[in-house]
Amino acid sequence: MTIDGAAFLITGGASGLGAAAATHLVDHGASVVLADVNTEDGEAHAKALGQQAIFVETDVTEAAQVQQAIDLGSTTFGGLNGALSCAGVVLARRTLSKHGAHDLESFSRVVQINLMGTFNVARLMAPLLAENEPNDESERGVLVNVASIAAFDGQIGQAAYAASKGGIVSMTLPLARDLAQNGIRVMAVAPGIFDTPMMASLPDDARESLGQQVPFPSRLGHPAEFAQLASAIITNPMLNGEVIRLDGAIRMGPR
Ligand SMILES: NC(=O)c1ccc[n+]([C@@H]2O[C@H](COP(=O)([O-])OP(=O)(O)OC[C@H]3O[C@@H](n4cnc5c(N)ncnc54)[C@H](O)[C@@H]3O)[C@@H](O)[C@H]2O)c1
């Protein structure tokens, strides 16, 4: 799919990986809908991107809000060609700690936002994309979901986060198979450790130490490198039903 002239919904587009993808896509001629709960950063980023971007306050767990973002984007830009599901939250909590057993509420919240939110976007985008005129490759749309290497190398305290990201990994192939007849591709990216506001909560020395654990290049990933991969996925019609690790060869240990 050609990026120039296309339009994409980007959940989590107010910050980090989603914001970087939005910048990259707009720089290459696309329009973007930034769908995020973070109104302040979302509106500021949309304003900075100019006329090719709008912000729509959206909680990915709410069907009506996701539908509204899709509808507004489609009306504003004359249709949508795909979605990048970058919205996500992280949680560090042991199954059993000195405070007792892991509470079910926070486990459920992480799965709701990361996994159910991603599926919510995929299922609601599908009918719109299926109506698109197919391009020369018979392609009507593309969905790029964001998992994590925690789906494979979940660390201590990551039961909820790893479960939510494992679900995104596992549904990649069935989503791609479901939507193949509609000419819609589905891919997932499993980032390693990226320098985003999500990581900024860690102290500098912890971030530096994490970066040094990456075999090569020994640093945190730049959000623009995620955007570069998302863009390669959008433009390469043969990429479908697969999860790509983007991690500088890091394999996380237990802690
Ligand atoms: N940064 C990393 O090292 C890393 C590594 C692996 C995976 N990831 C994943 O990449 C994605 C982006 O993370 P990031 O590092 O850019 O973090 P980030 O915190 O900078 O961005 C996440 C965005 O998601 C939004 N969001 C949270 N809950 C939402 C909801 N219910 N509805 C809509 N938007 C919501 C937040 O407001 C925020 O703008 C996440 O799914 C994260 O799990 C990040």
Image: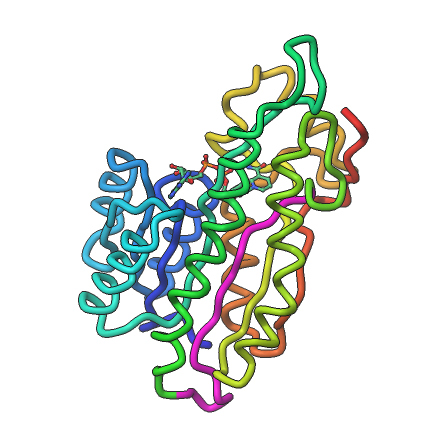
Please tell me which residue is depicted at 57% across the width and 33% down the height of the picture: 107
* Quadrant of residue 240 within the rendered picture: bottom right
In the rendered image, residue 143 lying in the magenta stretch gets the answer: yes
- Can you name the residue that lies furthest to the top here? 98
For this view, does 206 lie left or right of residue 34? Answer: right
Q: Is residue 208 above or below residue 162?
A: above
Q: Is residue 124 left or right of residue 162?
A: left
Q: Give the quarter of the figure containing the C terminus.
A: top right
Q: Could you tell me which residue is drawn at 70 percent across and 14 percent down?
A: 97
Front in this rendered view, residue 217 or 40: 40
Where does the image place residue 115, in percent across and percent down from the top left? Answer: 53, 49
For image coordinates 77% across by 35% down, the residue present is 252
Relative image position of residue 38 (x, y in whole percent): 31, 36
Figure disc tally:
0
The answer to if 34 sits in the magenta stretch is no
Residue 86, relative to residue 108: is it above or below? below
Q: Quadrant of residue 98?
A: top right
The residue at the point 42 percent across, 87 percent down is: 135
Specify whether 174 is left or right of 61.
right
Judging depth in this view, the residue of 7 and 228 nearest the camera is: 7
| Looking at the image, residue 51 lies above or below residue 208 | below
Q: Of residues 112 and 228, which is closer to you in this image?
A: 112
- 251 versus 234 height, above or below: above
175 vs 69, left or right, is right
Residue 24 in the image: state x and y as whole percent.
41, 55
- In this rendered view, identify the residue nearer to me: 150 or 175: 175
Q: Bounds of the magenta span?
A: 134-149
